[in-house]
Image (cartoon, helix red, strand yellow):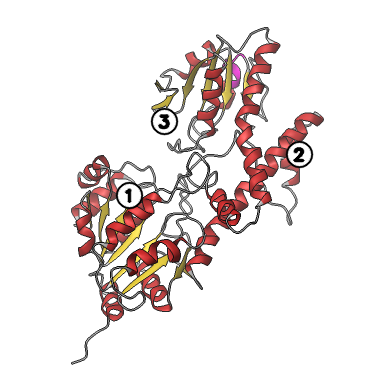
């Protein structure tokens, strides 16, 4: 009787949908991933340090806009999704995807402590026939140089006993056209067998998996994608500054340039960068290159421009108030939109928070309205969304548009606000001020 290898046993379990999947970190990346694996008929366990998230999943509720509650409830009813805070469950799983946060430290260097902590938990329970896939964004070399040695300490052999790969998340919250299921998934394995197993796993739930030659390539792919956006946003933000000096309308310039059918991709300026990827990921690459005695100049310059944009827009608020004979101190400033992008509830790294902080420093009375964010914390104070937008608009000495949510009626806002600073060009086709 032939004994199946760990690879063959795992491939068989993936093929017949008997493999158990674990998602460590069930946030904006992990919960949508859990949902698509569950929809493919695989039993999924979410593992998270947050008892609140675990309780929500087990009660059949979603806390992520991109995953409807009825989807979670159905997966629970079908016995395809559960969650726990107990890492001992890792020993029972056939596949483990790591979807934990990778922020920057205050020194602006990578903080991969969450990845390392999860890796230690896995290493303590690693057994033959498991595949581990890191999805958390990180610098090139993390999978092989940080995770692999800790797993190898178990005495098991990668590519034979267990399998290790990197597949960067490509979540864009709020999108309905490109989702976890139909967005192509890049995959790089430590060995060819690692790639084969990880690819087979993800192809059960993702429409297209794009194999690359190594984890390092896959890690670099993610950083290139977000560096591309960060640098181009930095460019158009600087173009905005240039147009301001030249007395030109930057929105008219960009819209006209975008009529070119080749050789130009439209990016728009704004209040700065936000979200869990674009403001952070390029700095992972910049940090890695500094360890190799190389300066990533485009990244550093774009970061400098983008980081200064909240200060630029606060100065515009100050100028608008000065023109009316008012000081910022004591003036009522209403911030419209605090989420980092349109039509989401995510405030991570949102430039609105920096703008509000700077306005507070100048003594402004700051309020906000956002149909997706019921409350935020600024300067240690918890602020609640203004319940009556019309009243808030009329009461404000200046309104600053930071996030251009689709729910906003711009004609109505322009009509009711005394003066408006528009960071998104939302009013560019309207007459500003009272009508």
Whether tag 1 and tag 3 are in contact, CB under 8 A, the answer is: no
Who is closer to the viewer here, 203 or 29?
Answer: 29
Tell me which residue sits at (51%, 33%) in the image. Answer: 405
Badge 1 marks a residue whose secondary structure is loop
Mark-to-mark CA distance, 2 and 3: 33 Å
Q: Is residue 327 left or right of residue 133?
A: right
Q: Is residue 205 visible?
A: no
Q: Which residue, given by chain and number where applicable, does mark 2 sit on?
A: 253
Of tags 1 and 2, the one toward the viewer is 1
- What residue lies at 40% left-to-right and 64% top-to-bottom? 206
Query: Residue 331: x, y in percent?
Result: 56, 10
Which residue is more in the foreground, 237 or 100?
100
Please tell me which residue lies in front, 243 or 255. Answer: 243
Is 415 within the magenta? yes
Q: Which residue is mark 1?
A: 26
Would you call the spot at circle 3 few (<14 residues within 10 Å), some (14-19), or many (20 or more)?
some
Give me the residue at 56% from left, 23% from top.
358
Q: Secondary structure at mark 3?
A: loop
Question: Where residue 155 appears, x then y in whole percent?
Answer: 28, 73
* Magenta stretch: dominant secondary structure: helix
Q: Which residue is mark 3?
A: 373
Residue range highlighted in magenta: 414-418
Q: Is tag 2's residue or tag 3's residue first in the polypeptide sequence? A: 2
Q: So how many labels did they put on this image?
A: 3
Q: Quadrant of residue 15?
A: bottom left
Nearer the observer: mark 1 or 3; the answer is 1
- Above or below — where is 417 with respect to 33? above
Numbered label attached to residue 233: none
Q: Nearer the viewer, residue 360 or 254?
A: 360
Can you give x and y, in whole percent of width and height, for residue 200 in the image? 37, 72
> Looking at the image, do the residues carrying marks 1 and 2 touch, with CB atoms under 8 Å apart?
no
């Amino acid at each position: 009787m032939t004994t199946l290898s760990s690879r063959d046993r795992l491939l068989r379990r993936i093929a017949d949908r008997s493999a158990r999947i674990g998602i460590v970190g069930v946030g904006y990346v992990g919960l949508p991933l859990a949902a698509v694996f569950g929809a493919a008929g695989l039993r999924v366990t979410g593992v998270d340090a947050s008892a609140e998230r675990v309780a929500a999943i087990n009660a059949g509720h979603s806390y992520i806009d991109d995953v409807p509650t009825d989807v979670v409830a159905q997966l629970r009813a079908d016995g395809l999704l559960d969650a726990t805070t107990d890492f001992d469950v890792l020993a029972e799983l056939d596949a483990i995807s790591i979807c934990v946060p990778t922020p920057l430290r205050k020194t602006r260097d990578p903080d991969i402590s969450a990845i390392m902590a999860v890796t230690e938990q896995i290493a303590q329970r690693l057994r033959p026939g498991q595949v581990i896939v890191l999805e958390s964004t990180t610098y090139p070399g993390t999978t092989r140089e940080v995770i692999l040695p800790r797993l190898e300490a178990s005495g098991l052999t990668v590519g034979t006993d267990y399998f290790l790969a990197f597949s960067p998340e490509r979540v864009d919250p709020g999108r309905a056209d490109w989702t976890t299921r139909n967005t192509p998934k890049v995959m790089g394995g430590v060995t060819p067998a690692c790639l084969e197993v990880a690819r087979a796993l993800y192809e059960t739930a993702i429409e297209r998996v794009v194999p690359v030659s190594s984890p390092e390539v896959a890690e670099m792919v993610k950083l290139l994608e977000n560096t591309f956006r960060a640098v181009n946003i930095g460019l158009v933000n600087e173009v905005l500054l240039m147009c301001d000096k030249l007395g030109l309308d930057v929105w008219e310039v960009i819209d006209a340039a975008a009529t070119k059918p080749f050789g130009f991709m439209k990016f728009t300026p704004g209040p700065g960068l936000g979200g869990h990827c674009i403001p952070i990921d390029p700095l992972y690459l910049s940090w890695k290159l500094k360890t190799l005695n190389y300066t990533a100049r485009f990244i550093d310059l774009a970061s400098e421009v983008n980081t200064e944009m909240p200060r630029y827009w606060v100065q515009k608020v100050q100028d608008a108030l000065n023109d009316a004979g008012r000081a910022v101190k004591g003036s009522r400033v209403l911030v419209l939109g605090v989420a980092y992008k349109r039509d989401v509830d995510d405030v991570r790294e949102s430039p609105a928070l920096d703008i509000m902080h700077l306005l507070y420093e100048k003594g402004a009375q700051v309020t906000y309205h956002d149909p997706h964010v019921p409350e935020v914390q600024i300067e240690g104070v918890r602020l609640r969304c203004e319940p009556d937008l019309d009243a808030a608009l009329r009461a404000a000495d200046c309104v600053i548009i930071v996030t251009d949510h689709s729910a906003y009626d711009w004609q109505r806002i322009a009509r009711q606000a005394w003066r408006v600073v528009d960071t998104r060009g939302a009013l560019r086709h309207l007459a500003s001020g009272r009508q």
